[in-house]
Image: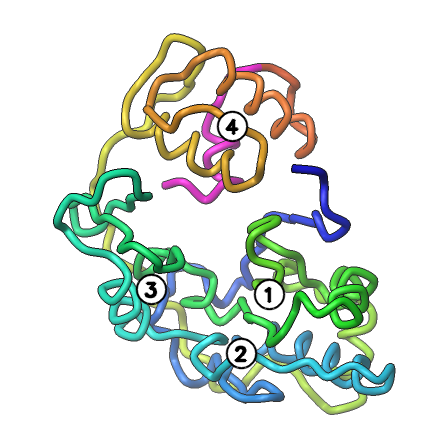
Amino acid sequence: MSKVAWNYIVPVKLPSDLNGVTPGKLSETLLKPALGGGKLHWLACAAWNAMVIKAKADGIVLKPTSSGDTYRSYDLQKAGFLQRYQLALIAGTSTKSFEGKTWYLKKGMAMLATPGKSQHNLGLAVDVHSASEAKRLNWLIANVKTFGFSWEVVPSEPWHIRYVNGDNPPVAVVEYMAANGISRPSNVEAPKVAPVVKTEIVPHLFSVGDSGPKVKHLQQALKKLNLYNGAVDGKFNQGTGEAVRKFKTANGLKSDMVAGPQVFKILGIA
């Protein structure tokens, strides 16, 4: 598939007040009402609201597809996940690991992140209503970076954007915050450190010849970015290596076929 014009993907930098916070269980003090419905982390909300106002001035309407497509609680994410995935084997469908089990995507259902793994659970993501409409999409292409947003899944999800600038919002957002008296909430609670759950230890490096569940997750992530077109079989083959090389080059890393901790971190693989 040819490269789309909105292929702008930047790793998310978390606002410092989200460090240690359990995704999907944000304090209400961290959340603010988003224009068009729903709530977002207060910094993402300022960026979104500033972008919505600028779009309106340019004759473009931006709004979330629903209030549930801004911040999602853990329970809401889980409910959506259980509607779309099942434990019973479905051949030829995508899978996700959750609660130590393999879940299969139901036929005809769109994929959804596992509970606690979505940027929606941190109040940083917005699904934009009718984002693929040409005029609206062209406006987003020209402006998302200005307001600190980027896409995450290209080309299948033009609607899904997330705030990526952490504690350093772009100038356009800083100006909006200053004009509207927006600053860090004074009553934000100290972050609660989530309990550490020991899971499978990720080897330091993966390269051609390795295999296993982590390689499969790597292939799935690279496939979503249209960098890998081979079988998602957990076998680190030459095609997987070439996809890793392309990904590392695009992200300013050493251009080789070795997938280390930084690659997994940028791809969001635990």
Question: Secondary structure under badge 1?
Answer: loop
Q: Which residue is mark 2?
A: 65
Mark 3 or 2: the one toward you = 2
**Does 121 sit above or below residue 61?**
above
Task: Looking at the image, tell me whether mark 4 or mark 2 is earlier in sequence order.
Answer: 2
Q: Position of residue 3 (x, y in %)?
A: 72, 40
Q: Which residue is mark 3?
A: 22
Label 3 and label 2: CA atoms lie apart by 25 Å
Q: Amino acid at mark 1?
A: Trp
Q: Position of residue 9 (x, y in %)?
A: 65, 48
Task: Looking at the image, tell me whether mark 3 or mark 2 is earlier in sequence order.
Answer: 3
Q: Sort mark 1 into few (<14), some (14-19) or many (20+) by Cα contacts within 10 Å.
A: many
Which residue lies at the image location 28% right of the left edge and 52% below the top edge? Answer: 105
Q: Sort mark 2 into few (<14), some (14-19) or many (20+) by Cα contacts within 10 Å.
A: some
Mark 4 or 1: the one toward you = 4
Q: Is residue 165 left or right of residue 204?
A: right
> Is 265 in the magenta?
yes
Q: Which residue is mark 1?
A: 159
Which residue lies at the image location 65% right of the left edge and 37% below the top edge? Answer: 1
- Give the image quarter of residue 246: top right
Label 4 and label 1: CA atoms lie apart by 23 Å
Q: Position of residue 109 (x, y in %)?
A: 35, 60
